[in-house]
Amino acid sequence: MAETDIRPTNFIRQIIDKDLAEGVHDHVHTRFPPEPNGYLHIGHAKSICLNFGLAQDYQGQCNLRFDDTNPEKENIDYVNSIQSDVKWLGFSWDGEICYSSDYFERLHGYAVELIEKGLAYVDFSSQEAMRELRGTLKEPGKNSPYRDTSVAENLAHFAKMTAGEYAEGHCVLRAKIDMASPFMCMRDPVIYRVKFAHHHQTGDKWCVYPMYDFTHCISDAIEGITHSLCTLEFQDNRRLYDWVLDNISIECRPRQYEFSRLNLEYTVLSKRKLIQLVDEKHVDGWDDPRMPTIAGLRRRGYTPASVREFCKRIGVTKMDNMVEMGMLEACIRDDLNQNAARAMAVLDPLKVVIENYPADQVETLSAPNHPSDESMGSRDIPFTREIYIEREDFREEANKKFKRLVLGKEVRLRNAYFLKAERVEKDAEGNITTLYCTYDPDTLGKDPADGRKAKGVIHWVSASHGVPAEVRLYDRLFKVPNPAGEENFTDSINAESLTVVQGILEPSLVSAEPGKALQFERLGYFCKDKQADKLVFNRTVGLRDTWAKIEGQE
Ligand code: ATP
Ligand code: MG
């Protein structure tokens, strides 16, 4: 798509420009550090575009690092999905993939260094006692009775922890910082705990695992990261990030900068909540097209360029905000309007018999794949005596505003002829079962010689050649703009987030590429589902922002 190529400026770029100008750094090295405990979502895309985008723009480097210090919640399926999502977004990491677990040996060494310097101690207090002593935001904490254990004893205890001689929860290693600090994270934070868990990278080698705050800064320093970008909730933790690096023997000195996370209306962007949606089967897996995951967006028909463009449009600031879903939809709509091939499908079929058309004739008409881009070529569509049109495109009577088919009046069939409605056939309940029409053979690709005008243009599909397919129409997954703010977010799930209809498609759509959206003329953008056992199309997005209109009326 036409991704806007104005290079956005933001406070992080200003920091980098200053660092480069003042010689603090002579290059830029960032990292994207997902924890492999879920699939990536659109919020991660913001972080990916920022980190990889900066590396690209400054001819620097960006690492992909799995922050894998919680083996119980992580697995290899997540590791693999994250790699494929980053690649799909159009980015590639520099060098080998990194894992925090690659540094377990060195991290352990730095923990020992802190103990040797009298800056860490093994605490055997119960969790409850530790919580009591931690204090509150208003009151300072109190020192643990284990705080003044000798260095030699601490070294022995940590060695025993490492050797698996202490049970889980029996003791932890804490940094000795300041129990009276106004920053809770500085009140002797835990830096190592015992966990007898199998790790997807290191197997059963370790039974002590380092905590995030201890691991992250050291991993950054080991990899030579210059600018370590994370979201605002880590603002206070920057003190701990700096404290650890200030107190161990490591040369490189990365700095942490925080930006606001992406919040998107009518969805949730927290892996914990997304896991719940999947586990409780509110959705059909991580890549359900209603999910805000990269995998879901891809299956829905979003393009990588549209997601990158979205990240560009939302920008990077320190302000907490909630982005409208319409903004994401506008990005995919702009892309597909320009790049998606056109095709015809009828989602609520009404049978039409063209009485003056020979019963066994099949005409092959040619239709352009794009109204304004000839390079996209054209395709053949069969025209026959019986066709389907959209039920809502016909009325027995209507006022002048109805620019579609009315009894006794004419419309143009898209890519074909003028069609005139003659009479209807109804069932016992009065529903129209068949519409009988006539066509004007002299109107293919030209207006009638006598100057008659059609009331409008409608789409259609040959009844004998059309292909039935399941079409899935998606709506927002939640009924409220901020489901995360509800007491129980799953209560606000939109029960009508998926409507399934049986449509009839023009035959060319059978060979459509899965995941690649096309425009069903007058209906919206749709893509073939990857599902192999039957023909299914997913609606990517409608043609217009009907949601904005509804909200405007309220
Ligand atoms: P979640 O809250 O969904 O569990 P997380 O922050 O725990 O997310 P990580 O795997 O640790 O997930 O995230 C990897 C990177 O992506 C981090 O640098 C994190 O700050 C960033 N990130 C996660 N969610 C968002 C978001 N909504 N907006 C911007 N960046 C995000
Ligand atoms: Mg995290």
Image: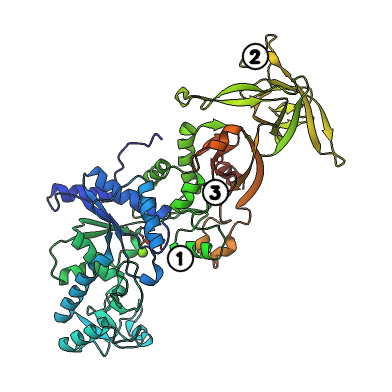
Instruction: Determine which residue is flagged by label 2.
Output: 447
Q: Is residue 483 left or right of residue 504?
A: left
Secondary structure under tag 3 reads: loop
Residue at label 1? 272
Cβ atoms at labels 2 and 1 below 8 Å apart: no
Crowding around mark 1 (Cα neighbors within 10 Å: few <14, some 14 to 19, many 20+) is: few
Which amino acid lies under the numbered mark 3 shown in the image of this protein? Gln
The mark found on residue 531 in the picture is 3
Q: For the residue labelled by badge 2, is the local secondary structure a helix, a strand or a loop?
A: loop
Is 498 displayed left or right of 464 in the figure? left
Residue 34 in sight here? yes
Q: Nearer the viewer, residue 499 or 205?
A: 205
- Looking at the image, is mark 3 or mark 2 earlier in the sequence? 2
Point out the tag, 1 or 3, that comes first from the N-terminus. Answer: 1
The image quarter containing residue 346 is top right
Position of residue 397 in the picture relative to residue 146 (left or right): right
Q: Are marks 1 and 3 in contact (CB under 8 Å)?
A: no
Does residue 503 appear left or right of residue 236 in this picture? right
Residue found at x 66% / y 15%: 443
Decide which of 521, 402 is in the foreground and name it: 521
> Mark 1: which amino acid?
Arg
Mark 2 residue's CB less than 8 Å from ligand 1: no
Residue type indicated by callout 2: Asp
CA distance for labels 2 and 1: 60 Å
Q: Is residue 202 above or below residue 32?
A: below
Please report the residue visible at 85 percent of the width from the left and 42 percent of the height from the top.
429
